[in-house]
Amino acid sequence: MGRAGFGDWEHGTLPAFHAAPPVPRTAPVGTREHPLPLIIDSDPGLDDALAIGLAVARPELDLLAVTTVGGNADVQHCTDNALRLLHAYGRSDIPVGEGAPGPLTGEVVRATAIHGESGIGRTRLPPSPVAAYPDGAVALMAQILRESPVPVAIAPVGPLTNIALLLRVHPELASRIAHLSIMGGSIGEGNTTVSAEFNIYADPEAADIVFRSSVPITMMGLDVTHQALLDGNAARRLRKLGTGSGSIAAELVEFALDRERAWYDAPAAAIHDAVAVAHLAIPDLVSVAGYHVEVDITHGPARGRTVCEGHPRRLSRSGRRPNADVGIHLDRGRFEEVMVDAFARLP
Ligand code: RIB
Ligand code: CA
């Protein structure tokens, strides 16, 4: 029997939705010999914190900066968390720039119910010896893009406000962005409303600007990030590393598990943001398909939905072409190995 919705003619069902076939990735991938220059734009954030650790640990990535945006928590918390996390991971040399406190328009949306008021649960970290970059996130990203000898990848893993501002204030730098590996959206249902995933729902207008831009995009939506699960066993493996970073990662996962159990009675937590980062370091972890993605910026029940069209006839009929790779599948066990291996490399 075919999977519900995919259709199974022998059993008299037609597909209820279209699943676009896998396609070769368009995102670049770093190598040990040629690490991919990377900026992470984030709202740390339990999974953001794990994604930053992954980026620091992977030799295929050269993390040039972390910028922050209000999302999971207030932007001041996110900035302080980013500084303290990089210090804990042994990389307080990586600059942090603070960005937009809230969306371009509309009301502020937070996810402190999941991430805690501080943004990183019950984790308390020593202060960083360094301060945030004085001119803020957009100026920091622009300076890096201007000065880098090669185009720089950006992994936006929070609301897309900073990226929209970067594209509006510095349109000449769009061509210096190698790729946007975005955690956000979904082909199917959302997680903040039935229509919208949090990062998009928190600033749909910014997401609309980004998806309409010429910059190449991979969208790691909930369809694939809900396969990137860590459970209590993974937390125990992280804690058994016996390092400061391993303990931090274990505590972040344990807090996420507590909230997932309380909210959804689920035995595992999706480490959404790490998928957007891992894709840039590992060529075959995530399979992708080509979709035309459009963001609903109306003010009705679909606000913040990433409308993903992958049906070839409908695309040609409307004259549209795919504007994004969309994450479809990853192997959960392999993802867990990637995360434990990464934190085994940190102090
Ligand atoms: O919907 C998941 C996204 O929202 C992740 O980026 C998580 O950190 C939250 O920001
Ligand atoms: Ca995030």
Image (tube, grey):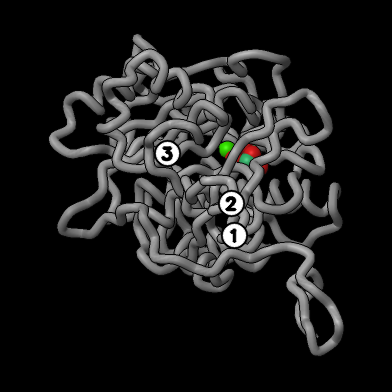
- Ligand 2 resides in the quarter of the picture at top right
Residue where numbered disc 3 is placed: 88
The residue singled out by tag 1 in the image is 313
The residues tagged by marks 1 and 2 sit, at their Cα atoms, a distance apart of 6 Å
Q: Position of residue 40 (x, y in %)?
A: 41, 36
Separation (CA) of disc 1 from disc 3: 51 Å
Amino acid carrying mark 2 in the image: Arg
Towards the viewer: 104 or 301:
301
Q: Residue at 73% across / 62% down in the picture?
A: 17
- Note whether 12 is above or below 66 in the view shown: below
Q: Which residue is mark 2?
A: 317
- Tell me the kind of residue under disc 1: Arg
Asked if disc 1 is less than 8 Å from ligand 1, the answer is: no
Would the CB of label 3 be found within 8 Å of ligand 2? no
Q: Position of residue 273 (x, y in %)?
A: 54, 46
Helix, strand or loop status at disc 2? helix
